[in-house]
Structure formats: structure tokens, C-alpha cells
Image (cartoon, rainbow, N blue to C red):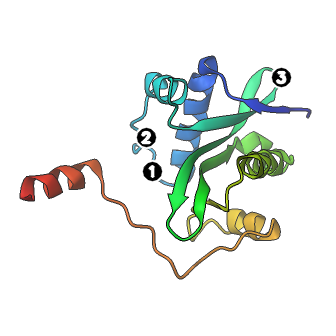
Amino acid sequence: MNYIIRDARKKDMSQVLHLIKELAVFEKEPDAVEVSVEDLQKDGFSLHPAFHCFVAEADSKIEGIALIYNRYSTWKGKILHLEDLIVSKSMRGSGMGTALLDEVIKYGHRLGVKRINWEVLDWNEPAIAFYEKKGANVMRDWDVVQLSETGIKNYIAKL
């Protein structure tokens, strides 16, 4: 099947959210998605967007996304964070994931970033193999640290 990779548009966000929810199910967190279409539209298409998104479109349907945003490393300088690279189950193995990752890498290169970061679940062996095949270093000696919204509120309450 043929597809195109392009910058996401505001009107794409309902299909983008559908893929985000599909990923949440795959990652065994089906009820974890709180973001709405309106959030994605506001946050991605405002005067100062919080993210940039590429979509892979086949037959007028978005079958894949790569959502990225800028970060800063105290050691390296400008870096890019790949929040999610999602390909619909029906399109896995089609080369769409590679095409999306290629677009992210080219985008980061154009921005002059020193590094592109992302996370992968330790049990997602197909994704780990995919990233390693592309030359990525899966750093198994680092742990992801998060403070949830509730954790933030509890922290603030203790100040």
C-alpha cells in the first residue's frame, strides 16, 4: 500500500488521538489517555506549539504518527524528544515506521540537534530490535522518572 508522510494538520487530531488510544491498549494502559482532540489542537497548533507531529497517510486515513518536541540537554545542548512513533496494527511491517523515523531524523538534523531521545518499554522486543537495527542505543541502565499530576499536587501541598 502506498502512503505519504507529511506534517500533521489541526484537522488530523481526531485520527491522531485514535492512534494514541490504540497505542495505550497495546501498552496495557487502555484507560490512561487523558488528552482530548481539543487539547491536541490547542497544544500543537497555537502560536507557540508544544509539539510537532508527522503523519503517515494511506487512502486518506492516518495510519501512523511521530510526535516530537524540543528539549535541552545540559551536556549536549538542543535535543529532540520523540514522544511516540505509532503505526496502526494493520500497517506494521509496511515500512511506515521506518519512513516516520526517517522524517524525525531529517527534521532533527535540519534543527541542528545534538541528540534525539525516546523511550521504549522493556518488554516491547520488536520495537527494541527495530530501533537497534536503525542504530539507536537502547540504554537499559537508565530508569524513566515521572511525577504525575497527583504527585505534583501532593509535592506542592508539602511545600
Q: Residue at x 67, y 56 (%)?
A: 113
Numbered disc 1: secondary structure? loop
Q: Residue at x 74, y 24 (%)?
A: 61
For label 1, count other residues whose C-alpha is less than 10 Å away and answer few (under 14), some (14-19) or many (20+).
few
Residue 118 visible: no
Q: In screen coordinates, is 140 left or right of 63?
A: left
Which kind of residue does numbered mark 1 sit on?
A: Glu
Of circles 1 and 2, the one toward us is 2
| Residue 59's disc number | 3
Q: Farthest right residue?
A: 2
Q: In screen coordinates, is 51 left or right of 107?
A: left
In the rendered image, the vertical position of residue 28 relative to residue 133, given as above or below = above
In the rendered image, the vertical position of residue 123 relative to residue 65, given as above or below = below
Q: CA distance from mark 3 to mark 2?
A: 27 Å
Task: Where is residue 141? Give x, y as percent.
Answer: 53, 82
Which kind of residue does numbered mark 3 sit on?
A: Asp
| Residue 66's disc number | none
Disc 1 and disc 2 in contact, CB within 8 angstroms: yes
Check disc 1 and report the residue beneath it: 29
Q: CA distance from mark 3 to mark 1?
A: 29 Å
Check disc 2 and report the residue beneath it: 33
Residue 129 or 52: which is nearer the viewer?
52
Q: In screen coordinates, is 103 left or right of 14?
A: right
Task: Where is residue 2? Give x, y as percent.
Answer: 91, 32
Q: Earlier in the sequence, mark 3 or mark 2?
A: 2
Task: Where is residue 142? Give x, y as percent.
Answer: 50, 77
Name the quadrant of the N terminus: top right
